[in-house]
């Protein structure tokens, strides 16, 4: 079972696309623990896809991210960095509660 995060399917899909795009642009992102856990698996899938490196993989990545520059970075820089690693490309560090609503926060980063 996956986390619904209080959104309908289209809003959830858009949220994941924007969080993934920001994550690959910056290499790390601070978000809630629930979002970090969901996005971590999706990020691992995209890195594995980028390691394949063919045209079909690139088109799939473009469909899942908002920015083509980020897709270029994913295929050229990030995939090369993990070519010898078999999965486990992301790390989640728990940070503690958010000031406004005490939501548990986490730092999602590339290993």
Image (cartoon, rainbow, N blue to C red):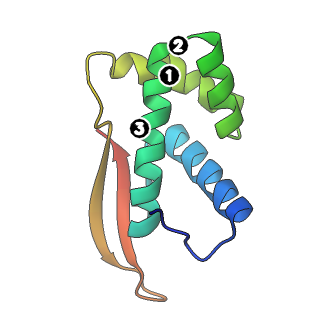
User: Which quadrant is the N terminus positioned in?
Assistant: bottom left
Q: How many marks?
A: 3
Label 3 Cα neighbours within 10 Å, binned few <14 / some 14-19 / many ≥20: some
Q: Which residue is mark 1?
A: 50
Q: CA distance from mark 3 to mark 2?
A: 15 Å
Q: Please say if 42 is above or below 80.
A: below
Mark seen at residue 74: none
State whether residue 53 appears in this view: yes
Q: Is there a contact, CB below 8 Å, between mark 2 and mark 1? A: yes
Residue occupying the point 71% across, 41% down: 66
Residue occupying the point 41% across, 49% down: 40
Q: Secondary structure at mark 1?
A: helix
Q: Which residue is mark 3?
A: 44
Q: Secondary structure at mark 3?
A: helix
Q: Position of residue 83 (x, y in %)?
A: 33, 16
Q: Which residue is mark 2?
A: 53
Does label 3 or label 1 sit earlier along the sequence? Answer: 3
Label 1 Cα neighbours within 10 Å, binned few <14 / some 14-19 / many ≥20: many
Q: CA distance from mark 3 to mark 1?
A: 10 Å
Residue occupying the point 55% across, 72% down: 5
Q: Position of residue 8 (x, y in %)?
A: 69, 69
């Amino acid at each position: 079972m996956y986390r619904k995060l209080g959104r309908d399917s289209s809003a959830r899909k858009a949220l994941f696309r924007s969080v993934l795009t920001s994550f690959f642009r910056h290499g790390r992102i601070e978000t809630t623990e629930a979002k970090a856990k969901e996005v971590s698996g999706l990020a691992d899938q995209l890195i594995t896809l980028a390691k394949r490196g063919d045209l079909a993989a690139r088109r799939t990545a473009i469909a899942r991210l908002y920015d083509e520059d980020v897709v270029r970075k994913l295929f050229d820089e990030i995939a090369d960095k993990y070519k010898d690693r078999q999965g486990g490309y992301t790390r989640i560090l728990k940070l503690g509660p958010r000031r406004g609503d005490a939501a548990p926060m986490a730092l999602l980063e590339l290993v």
